[in-house]
Image (cartoon, rainbow, N blue to C red):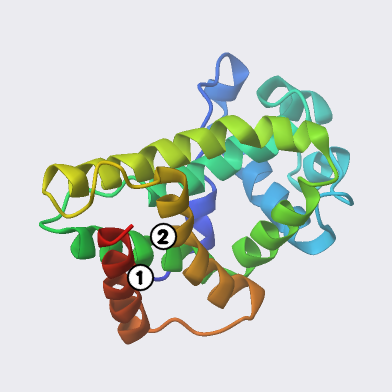
């Protein structure tokens, strides 16, 4: 099973307290509607009041969970982004990359996520509050990619002197470009070839 359902986007990430714990269905509804509204209107047109209304709750319930739109965006995206970069160790760099790329593909196949990710990377250049809120998530995601690189270095598949920032860019960029920017397909054979190509590039970095 490789397709990620919309229900996978509903799991809350933050450590909630009080009424938020007592009413997880409200949190789930707010999460689902938040992603739907973002995909439909873009971040700039996203209204938390409309999110609360469509979720069938009041603004107070939303603000008890998330103080503002940027925090809510960072929080909920972390639930998607950190899960897909948490790759269990495989037997080789190529296998690690294959598992990671399939995980990324599962998420990017979701139409809402594709629209949201494209809008996010456009919006963070214009919205400093969103950029600041997303930065800790980006650092944590990059740290998990570093774990994959560390394993490859320990196995002797990569040089310790390899530029980690460049390596992380090489891992993520080709699949993102294909699926989000040009709307191309990424079938199993493409992922297999891509994993091999990226592994070969990293071994020589």
Residue 2, disc = 1
Residue at left 71%, top 30%? 132
Image quadrant of residue 136? top right
Closer to the chain start, of discs 2 and 1, is 1
Residue 134 horizontal side relative to residue 139, left or right: right
Write down the residue under mark 2. 171
Looking at the rendered image, the disc whose residue lies closer to the viewer, 2 or 1, is: 2
Helix, strand or loop for disc 2: helix
Helix, strand or loop for disc 1: loop
Asked if 154 appears above or below 183 in the picture, the reply is: above
In depth, the one of 163 and 48 nearer the eye is 163
In the rendered structure, are the residues bearing label 2 and label 1 in contact, judged by CB atoms less than 8 Å apart? no
Asked if 81 appears above or below 139 in the picture, the reply is: below
Residue 96: percent from the left, percent from the top? 23, 58
The quadrant the N terminus occupies is bottom left
Asked if 180 appears above or below 166 in the picture, the reply is: below
Residue 28 horizontal side relative to residue 174, left or right: right
Q: CA distance from mark 2 to mark 1?
A: 20 Å
Image quadrant of residue 51? top right
In depth, the one of 59 and 102 nearer the eye is 102
């Amino acid at each position: 099973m490789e397709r990620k359902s919309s229900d996978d986007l509903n799991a809350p990430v933050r450590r909630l307290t009080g009424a938020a714990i007592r009413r997880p269905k409200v949190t789930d509804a707010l999460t689902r509607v938040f992603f739907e509204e973002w995909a439909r209107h873009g971040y700039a047109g996203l209204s938390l009041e409309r999110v609360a209304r469509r979720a069938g709750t009041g603004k107070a319930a939303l603000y008890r969970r998330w103080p503002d739109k940027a925090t809510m965006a960072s929080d909920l995206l972390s639930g998607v982004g950190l899960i897909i970069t948490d790759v269990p160790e495989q037997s080789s760099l190529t296998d690690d990359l294959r598992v990671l790329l399939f995980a990324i593909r599962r998420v990017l196949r979701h139409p809402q996520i594709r629209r949201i990710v494209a809008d996010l990377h456009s919006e963070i250049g214009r919205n400093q509050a969103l950029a600041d809120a997303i930065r800790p998530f980006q650092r944590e995601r990059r740290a998990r990619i570093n774990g994959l690189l560390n394993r490859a270095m320990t196995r002797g598949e990569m040089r310790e002197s390899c530029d980690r920032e460049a390596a992380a860019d090489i891992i993520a960029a080709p699949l993102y470009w294909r699926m989000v920017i040009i709307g191309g397909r990424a079938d199993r054979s493409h992922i297999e070839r891509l994993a091999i190509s990226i592994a070969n590039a990293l071994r020589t970095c």
